[in-house]
Image: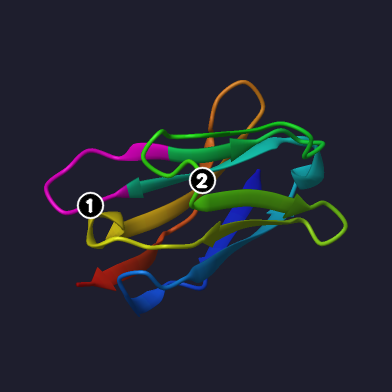
Amino acid sequence: QVQLVESGGGLVQAGGSLRLACAASGRASSTIAMGWFRQAPGKEREFVAGITSSGNIANYADSVKGRFTISRDNAKNAAYLQMNRLKPEDTAVYYCAAGYNAYDYWGQGTQVTVSS
């Protein structure tokens, strides 16, 4: 089992920045891929960004490319999502996820609200 705990959400004005963190613990948490998803009110959960276990490959949803950066620190068993130039449409609950062949483990989520 892998446990994930997100932090860093909050309220920010459009154009601002936030950095989300995901603390991982449990079985081999440094050897699995990690990612971020989000779910806005009334919408389905969507993929935001993912990163391989080594951290050398990352991919992003088109909607966040050039604005968000995913990273990880395996020594700290943590992953991060740096969000810049935030837009009101980025408002959502952000979830950290992890897994080997699929995202099997999920955090509880952290709220990000971007005001216009």
Horizontal relation, residue 76 to residue 22: left or right: right
Horizontal relation, residue 4 to residue 41: left or right: right
Quarter occupied by residue 105: top right
Q: Which residues are magenta?
A: 39-47
> How many circles with numbers are drawn on the protein?
2
Query: Which amino acid is tagged 2?
Result: Gly
Horizontal relation, residue 43 to residue 98: left or right: left
| Main secondary structure found in the magenta portion | loop
User: Which residue appears at 40% of the width and 33% of the height?
Assistant: 62
Q: Position of residue 72 (x, y in %)?
A: 73, 51
SS for callout 1: loop
User: Which residue appears at 36% of the width and 48% of the height?
Assistant: 38
Above-or-below relation of 102 to 86: above
Q: Position of residue 101 (x, y in %)?
A: 62, 20
| Nearer the camera: disc 2 or disc 1 | 2
User: Which residue appears at 83% of the width and 51% of the height?
Assistant: 74
Way the structure is coloured: rainbow
Foreground residue among 27 and 97: 97
Residue on which disc 1 sits: 40
Crowding at mark 2 (Cα within 10 Å: few <14, some 14-19, many 20+): few
Quarter occupied by residue 57: top right
Which of the two discs, 2 and 1, labels the residue nearer the N terminus? Answer: 1
Foreground residue among 106 and 80: 80
Horizontal relation, residue 4 to residue 52: left or right: left
Quadrant of the image for the C terminus? bottom left
Q: Which mark is residue 66?
A: 2
User: Which residue appears at 51% of the width and 45% of the height?
Assistant: 66
Query: Which amino acid is tagged 1?
Result: Ala
Cα–Cα gap, marks 2 and 1: 21 Å
In the picture as drawn, the residue positioned furthest to the right comes out as 75
